[in-house]
Image (spheres, rainbow, N blue to C red):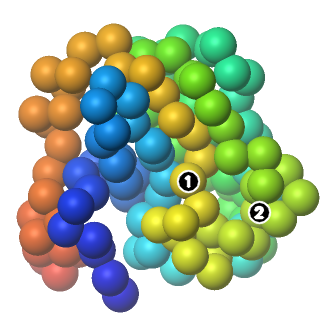
């Protein structure tokens, strides 16, 4: 499995790509592997606001339904509409198939995220 070093991660298996005051969010390769075949992604509405820790999407797979928590608070400014018709894109490339883009309300919340090395180390310990 790969864990791109330019991303930040959460222990809940969410990756974060920071671009200025916005962040693209998705689930990690490990998460998609554990979920199995992804069948549906419940995309939030553009303009919706969430606090860090709030559930912003639910992903349904062949194995389970899984709630995904927001790693940083802010307003949804874009959703990956391709996932409506092709949720399996996450299985094909978890790091290209972002779910939402959020305009962060407090960039200091990024300090709570972990590096690729720390994320991978946490998986090895589990």
Task: Give the crowd class for mark 1: few <14, some 14-19, many >=20 residues within 10 Å.
Answer: many
- Residue positioned 35% across, 87% down in the render: 1
What kind of element bears circle 2?
Answer: loop
User: Left or right: 104 with respect to 65?
Assistant: left
User: Left or right: 104 with respect to 4?
Assistant: right
Residue 73: which quarter of the image? top left
Q: Give the vertical position of 70 relative to 80 (above or below).
A: above
Question: In terms of depth relative to the viewer, which is nearer, 126 or 48?
Answer: 48
- Checking the image for residue 40, the label placed there is none
What kind of element bears circle 1?
Answer: loop
Q: Quadrant of the C terminus?
A: bottom left
Task: Give the crowd class for mark 2: few <14, some 14-19, many >=20 residues within 10 Å.
Answer: many
- Checking the image for residue 98, the label placed there is 1
Residue 60: which quarter of the image? bottom right
Are discs 2 and 1 less than 8 Å apart at CB?
no
Q: Give the vertical position of 51 relative to 65 (above or below).
A: above
Residue 43, x across and y down, in percent: 72, 37
- Residue positioned 30% across, 41% down in the render: 18
Nearer to us of marks 2 and 1 is: 1
Residue 35 visible in the displayed image: no
Question: In terms of depth relative to the viewer, which is nearer, 11 or 93?
Answer: 93
List the residue tagged with mark 2.
Answer: 87
Residue positioned most to the front? 20
Residue 52, x across and y down, in percent: 35, 23
User: Left or right: 113 with respect to 48?
Assistant: left
Residue 87, x across and y down, in percent: 77, 63
Question: In terms of depth relative to the viewer, which is nearer, 123 or 109?
Answer: 109
Q: Give the vertical position of 125 relative to 14 (above or below).
A: below
């Amino acid at each position: 499995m790969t864990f791109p070093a330019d991303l930040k991660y959460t222990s809940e298996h969410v990756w974060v790509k920071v671009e200025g005051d916005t962040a693209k969010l998705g689930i990690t390769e490990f998460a998609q592997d554990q979920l199995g075949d992804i069948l549906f992604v419940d995309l939030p509405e553009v303009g919706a606001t969430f606090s860090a820790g709030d559930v912003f999407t639910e992903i349904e797979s062949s194995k389970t339904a899984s709630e995904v928590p927001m790693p940083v608070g802010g307003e949804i400014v874009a959703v990956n509409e391709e996932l409506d018709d092709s949720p399996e894109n996450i299985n094909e490339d978890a790091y290209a198939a972002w779910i939402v883009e959020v305009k962060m309300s407090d960039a200091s919340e990024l300090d709570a995220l972990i590096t690729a090395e720390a994320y991978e180390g946490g998986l090895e310990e589990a």
